[in-house]
Image: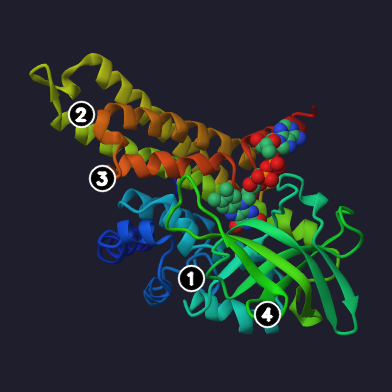
Amino acid sequence: MTIVDTPERRQLRELTRAFVTKEVLPNLDDWERAGDVPRSLHETAAKIGLLGIGFPEAVGGSGGDLLDSILVTEEVIRSGGSSGLIAALFTHGIALPHMVASQDDGLIERYVRPTLAGTMIGALAITEPDGGSDVAGIRTCARRDGDHYVVNGSKTYITSGVRSDFVTTAVCTDFPGSGTLSLLVVEKGTPGFTVGRRLEKLGWHCSDTAELSFVDVRVPVANRIGPEDTGFLAIMQQFATERLSLATQAYATAQRCVELATRWCRDRSTFGRPLASRQLVRHRLAEMHTRAEAARAYVHDVAERVAAGEPVVTEVAMAKNVAVAACDFVVDAALQLHGGFGYLRDAEVERHYRDARILGIGGGTTEIMNEIIAKGMGL
Ligand SMILES: Cc1cc2nc3c(=O)[nH]c(=O)nc-3n(C[C@H](O)[C@H](O)[C@H](O)COP(=O)(O)OP(=O)(O)OC[C@H]3O[C@@H](n4cnc5c(N)ncnc54)[C@H](O)[C@@H]3O)c2cc1C
């Protein structure tokens, strides 16, 4: 099955491709070196309606659903962008959904609208230095004090955490590790809230990643998302979208690398003949293409079911693992087919090879996905 192609979706693909060609491709190498993307990119993407895809117009979005967001992610990467760029420019895809779901007008006006207009940047902070897989084990705590919470703790590996104006933060509202969680929006500049470090990474170089520290940070109760102690459920409900986005980044990266490798193998000759004339090489490309296409079809199928409201937690986990496995295979093979050039910064496959490694870690690791799948099997 594939996502139904409509005139609107064809237009969305063209809009995305034009945006990447004009705004991203001439600058991506510079942003990779700089370690982040400029704020102006968010504003430009917002002005043409790209930033708000998948968010209702009632909260400042451009409309569309999960399938439209998937198309945008796919097209950004297939047009020569990268999963790192998706992480940096579309961080609001993980920072805002809990607020939108809460239907809290105050939070929507203060954070959701400006972010979708490209004038604010948000981040989502769940992971802590003590561990990310065990969400219930969160130790950053919020103690109620009148009409404020007092937050103490730390978070790490937070995407866009260096640039963000606010952070949707998972805190424990009982004792540390109790699993009783709430989500608070913590604003940059609040006394006691600091970015400890900008973290250096293997890939996703254009996406800044932060360590965050909270020391007696006073956060208004009005900044709580939804009722107290409902944070764990809210986080789990939004994981499906994040995991499908990562799965999309994985198969789209694989598709892009198949295209790059195919072009390379047609153009590159060894021993007097194009690489693509060798059966071994053609079969390798055929296998790469098959794995990328199978992953795309399965991710689209699961995404359609999520969009239709089906309870497919297990299938989402399988889709992420299938797409990540396809991507890992393809980026490695694509780099190998490029020979020495594949190892150079000048080669686009080199960036995809590095960027791809996070996809089986972020949003729940491959092992945690397997835990979910095993549970779904009744094990
Ligand atoms: C570039 C980058 C960006 C990120 N962005 C964000 C972000 O924006 N917000 C955020 O909150 N987090 C973010 N993360 C964190 C990411 O979600 C976590 O790294 C991930 O969930 C794993 O947590 P961990 O690193 O603490 O590993 P751990 O939980 O310590 O796990 C270590 C290893 O043990 C395995 N493992 C753990 N438990 C089990 C088990 N029960 N059975 C078998 N194996 C197990 C894991 O699969 C993993 O291989 C980001 C990470 C990176 C690197």
| Residue type highlighted by circle 2 | Cys
Q: Secondary structure at mark 4?
A: helix
Q: Nearer the viewer, mark 2 or mark 4?
A: 2
Disc 1: CA contacts within 10 A as few (<14), some (14-19) or many (>=20): many
Question: Quick check: is the Cβ at mark 1 less than 8 Å away from ligand 1?
Answer: no
| Residue type highlighted by circle 3 | Asp
Q: Secondary structure at mark 2?
A: helix
Residues at circles 1 and 4 in contact by the CB criterion of under 8 Å? no
Give the CA distance from mark 1 to mark 4. Answer: 17 Å
Specify which label sits upstream in the sequence, 1 or 4. 1
| Residue type highlighted by circle 1 | Gly
Give the CA distance from mark 1 to mark 3. Answer: 32 Å
Which residue is under mark 4? Answer: 107
Disc 2: CA contacts within 10 A as few (<14), some (14-19) or many (>=20): many
Nearest the viewer among 47 and 189 is 189
Give the CA distance from mark 2 to mark 3. Answer: 17 Å
